[in-house]
Image (spheres, rainbow, N blue to C red):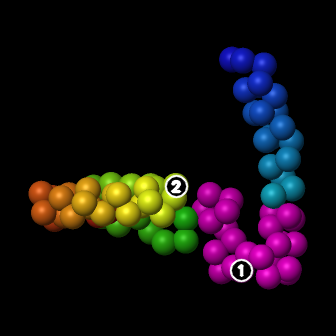
Amino acid sequence: MSPALAAYRLMTRLFEPLAPRLLDGRVKQGKEDHDRVDERLGVAGAPRPAGELVWLHGVSVGETLSLLPVVERLRKLRPDLTIL
């Protein structure tokens, strides 16, 4: 493991207990949605749908729009898939 990765992991473990407190502050400031704040901690707010799931991600609007033909094709080929 590289020293940078080791340092990152150490810092994450040290600061992880502070995350709920920081998020509470952001909720009070109106910067986070109270009902969805647990998602910031990795707790899913909705159950995973049954069956196979395909997760597509685009960083920008352009990348997201470029995924639309992929989604259309997947829906035609595999209507049983859940596409997120």
Amino acid, disc 2 = Val
Tell me if residue 28 can be seen. yes
Q: Residue at x 67, y 62 (%)?
A: 40
The label number, if any, that marks residue 34 in the structure image: 1
Which residue is more in the foreground, 38 or 28?
28
Disc 1 to disc 2, how far (Cα)? Answer: 25 Å
Dot 1 surroundings within 10 Å: few (below 14), some, or many (20 or more)? few
Q: Which residue is mark 2?
A: 59
Query: Residue, x 26% and y 56% (percent of image)?
Result: 70
Which quarter of the figure has residue 41?
A: bottom right
Q: Compared to 8, does 26 lie above or below?
A: below
The chief SS type of the magenta part is helix
Residue 51 at least partly seen: no
The quadrant of the image that shows the N terminus is top right
> In this picture, which residue range is highlighted in magenta?
20-43
Residue 15 in the image, given as x and y percentages of width and height:
85, 47
Residue 82 magenta-drawn?
no
Q: Which label is found at residue 20?
A: none
Counting from the top left corner in percent of width and height, residue 53 is at: 32, 57
Q: Tag 1: residue type?
A: His
Q: Counting other residues with Cα less than 10 Å from the Cα at mark 2, is it few (<14), some (14-19), or many (20 or more)?
A: few
Q: Secondary structure at mark 2?
A: loop
Q: Residue 65 at x, y = what percent?
A: 38, 63
Residue 75 image position (x, y, % from top left): 19, 64
Q: Residue at x 34, y 58 (%)?
A: 67
Helix, strand or loop under label 1: helix
